[in-house]
Image (tube, coloured by chain):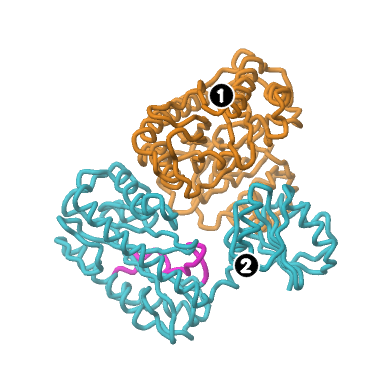
Chain colours: A orange, B cyan
Amino acid sequence: MNYMLKDENAIYYECGYSCDNALYLSLGAEAFFITDSRYTIDAQQNVKGANVVIDGDLYGSAVKLLKKAKVKKVVFDPKEWSVAGFEKVTSQCKVTFKPELDFSHKKRIIKSDEELKILAKAVKLGAKAFKALAKEFSENGFGEDEYALTYTAKSILGGFGKYELSFDPIVAVNANAAKPHAMPTKTKLKKGDLLLVDAGLKYKRYCSDCTRTVEAGKGFKFDTKQKFKSKKIQKAYDTVLKAHDNAIAKARSGMKAKKVDALTRDIITKAGFGEYYVHSTGHGVGLDIHEMPYISTKSDTIIEDGMVYTIEPGIYIPDEFGIRIEDMVAMVDGKALVL
Amino acid sequence: MNYMLKDENAIYYECGYSCDNALYLSLGAEAFFITDSRYTIDAQQNVKGANVVIDGDLYGSAVKLLKKAKVKKVVFDPKEWSVAGFEKVTSQCKVTFKPELDFSHKKRIIKSDEELKILAKAVKLGAKAFKALAKEFSENGFGEDEYALTYTAKSILGGFGKYELSFDPIVAVNANAAKPHAMPTKTKLKKGDLLLVDAGLKYKRYCSDCTRTVEAGKGFKFDTKQKFKSKKIQKAYDTVLKAHDNAIAKARSGMKAKKVDALTRDIITKAGFGEYYVHSTGHGVGLDIHEMPYISTKSDTIIEDGMVYTIEPGIYIPDEFGIRIEDMVAMVDGKALVL
């Protein structure tokens, strides 16, 4: 099969290198990594299994290679290509370009042993950062607003410049945690507040992703065991934790993804919080922070060994509080192993 | 004219608000800002001059609005739209979609007085950060590698969480500065090294952009007046500074952009460094770090009052050193005013 890629991570997956201006062609037995002269040295040293082509005009270069290879059909993902870039290639070639949504994500849904090791290491580094963050917040976080707390989370998760982040961390206090994608506000953290942190870092380009919700007292930790003085919050927290643990214990290879979603959702619904669980159970994680499989009420994807995804149930009571507990699991020997 | 926008900054320019999942339609006298429910409150509070539509299916929502408005022609920028998103809208409408490259950038090429004020403030904050950075590097930077120096630059330019950055700063020592888009290495800064820093921050979403090249001694400053112990470096530096100053002094509204480019290039070429000046003189700056006008050897764009762009000549001697001096100018009363 012939295919062409434009997305940075999709290209990295093919040849072990990528940059912000690259185009990748796989044409029969040959593959081509096209980039501009800023990346000549890095590309030549790192690209594996593809010919490096240096040309400021990526699209023009692709057209030449497509014509030379005389291929008839080329697969592409319409999400990866801009209308302008796609037009530049396709208007000059008598080739059939076949759209296939999530083409690269589908290839990447089962992680190799090497990828699983890297992802496990990313998660381990993330967990270490959460420990350091709890210590820092406990010592210096009270009285700071969400902007400052978010900056601290970025610094610590990023290893003070050592790692890139999987995404901008979410650090939300009390009612702000009720928004699943909360943006920072001027709300200050006080002792006894509910604190939700959702954050991750990248190790060798692979993402970690973790959420903890705690009552922020002196010396608090980002453990999943938490005591809240509010009975209502405690009830919601215990429900989310039960849902989280249930999915991890009972997810199996061979199940449909929507069955895994039900493992969290049924518990939350039975406890009377169903309407406050406003998102899916989880998403795949790899080079991208959101990949396949999607663990949603509608997904018929069959869970298989080697898949890596999040289990992240939540309960969000508007204007009061939000709770989410998230871990990444890998399917190993038919079961979900927490990374 | 009817048009549809997908780019975050293009949308912000129209209505004073944007987010990472939005679509904007301008249809006759009415305009529509479409986003999902995560942004309901922010959009309703901040969008000006457009109806806020909350719908998780942005494209489906756009189709409904296009059908209802019964418009015949809609302009779009093919660089802004993915093939998948464009297809979702266009396959369901009997409308002529007219591609216009850089549609929003063309609208934004002349800055308003309000925008000029914001850009001037962004540059001022950037200059303040460069001062603080020189102090920090001078006190604690020697012995640190480019990764650590880059992290420090990010922290200081970002006001420790207060501002977003215009781009990832470039901090390059000696031979690494010879790459115009240098990535950090493990090279450590020593006293007397050549140090190039290219960095900027965002104020009210508008970008600053500045480059300085210095000999990093005790108490050094990021001024344009610099003394280098190497005669070769000094000669190159003086040439770049002369080119930079010449363009600022002689750029005029009414000139073609390529004439402005020649104001730096001719001086560098005459000094015998022409082959080492491997890029254009500058680029427009605004909501995006790279906008129109492009100050290149090929650009026939007529420079006008209200345009804002960089003057950033450079000389790059491979494996030896690189020099670049960059400032942002605004065209005011026919002349280039350094911001």
Q: Does the magenta stretch include residue A213?
A: no
Q: Please tell me which residue lies in front, A191 or A243.
A: A191
Up/down of B41 relative to A210, above or below: below
Q: Name the residue under label 2.
A: B14
Contact? badges 2 and 1 (CB < 8 Å): no
Q: Quadrant of the C terminus of chain B?
A: bottom left
Residues tagged by mark 2 and mark 1 found on one chain of the structure: no
Residue B291 drawn at (x, y percent) = 51, 67
Q: Counting other residues with Cα less than 10 Å from the Cα at mark 1, is it few (<14), some (14-19), or many (20 or more)?
A: few
Which residues make up the magenta segment? B272-292
Location of residue B201 by image quarter: bottom left
Up/down of B193 relative to B5, above or below: above
Say which chain tag 2 marks: B
Q: Please tell me which residue lies in front, A86 or A252.
A: A252
Residue B307 shows in this picture: yes
Residue A64 drawn at (x, y percent) = 61, 53
What amino acid type should be assigned to the residue bearing mark 1?
Ser
Q: Quadrant of the N terminus of chain B?
A: bottom right
Q: Is residue B298 left or right of residue B90?
A: left
Q: Name the residue under label 1.
A: A112
Up/down of B201 relative to B309, above or below: above
Q: Identify the residue shown where x is 46% and y is 35%.
A: A201
Residue A68 shows in this picture: no
- Magenta region's main secondary structure? loop
Q: Please tell me which residue lies in front, A189 or B123.
A: A189
Q: Real-space Cα distance between discs 2 and 1?
A: 46 Å
Residue A251 drawn at (x, y percent) = 66, 18
Q: Which of marks 2 and 1 is in front?
A: 2
What amino acid type should be assigned to the residue bearing mark 2?
Glu
Q: Please tell me which residue lies in front, A233 or A46.
A: A233
Say which chain tag 1 marks: A
Residue A65 drawn at (x, y percent) = 61, 49
